[in-house]
Image (cartoon, helix red, strand yellow):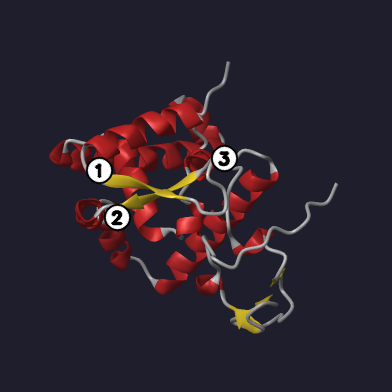
Amino acid sequence: MSSIFDPKEQERNIDAKIVAGLERISRVFKLLLWDVAKEENLSPIQIQFLVYLAYNRASRSRITDIANEFALTKATVSDAISSLEEKGLVKRVENREDRRNYFLKLTQKGKKVAEDVSNWADVLKSELKNFSVKEKEMFLSFILNLIGALYDAGIITIQRMCFSCIYFQKNVHPDSKSPHHCGLLDKPLSIVEIRLDCEDYEPAVKSA
């Protein structure tokens, strides 16, 4: 049986080689995250939750929101959040519109820890300086299209990227450095202006 992890399969199949390369990069993310987690005496997922709460709007800070964002069960998220509460990093805030639910908010201590750990992937960013703008634009285009394809296939369930937004108009400015267009902002978009996580995102209706 062929496998993308079989070097012989990678030799003859570029798709297998690409997937194996992405998996190799994912290992780097895990190692970097584990290093920071051990320093802070937190689990990697707790680090990710702190960073998520630090940089996302309050309306997306419920247990359900986090579970959907990270494709985890509410029980798993609840356990991790309870531990962060015990450490004094997160607190619960009453939802006045629905008293059955509550929002999660970082404490002052939690904000400081989130700020300290949010740079855990900066080493990768620094390495990108060694590549040309053209190389990075081509790679970004590939990543965006891959994420979009995974979303269309139902593998990624939550994303707020331009390509699947109701306001996005693809290639309406051909032969331009900014070929796409945002209907909400009413402005052309270059590949580097495509957003991975937009606060104004509205999902387009998927075609049957």
Indicate the amino acid at tag 1: Leu
> For mark 1, what is the residue?
32
Disc 3 is placed on an element classified as: helix
- How far across and down, in percent of the image, does residue 6 sit? 46, 24
Decide which of tag 1 and tag 2 comes sooner along the chain.
Answer: 1
Q: Nearer the viewer, residue 14 or 166?
A: 166
Closer to us: mark 1 or mark 2? 1
Disc 1 is placed on an element classified as: helix
> For mark 3, what is the residue?
15
Q: Nearer the viewer, residue 149 or 48?
A: 48
How packed mark 3 is, by other alpha carbons closer than 10 Å (few <14, some 14-19, many 20 or more), is few
Q: Please tell me which residue is depicted at 29% across the width and 65% down the height of the picture.
A: 130
Indicate the amino acid at tag 2: Leu
Q: Please tell me which residue is depicted at 58% across the width and 47% down the height of the picture.
A: 158
> For mark 2, what is the residue?
124
Residue 180's image quarter? bottom right
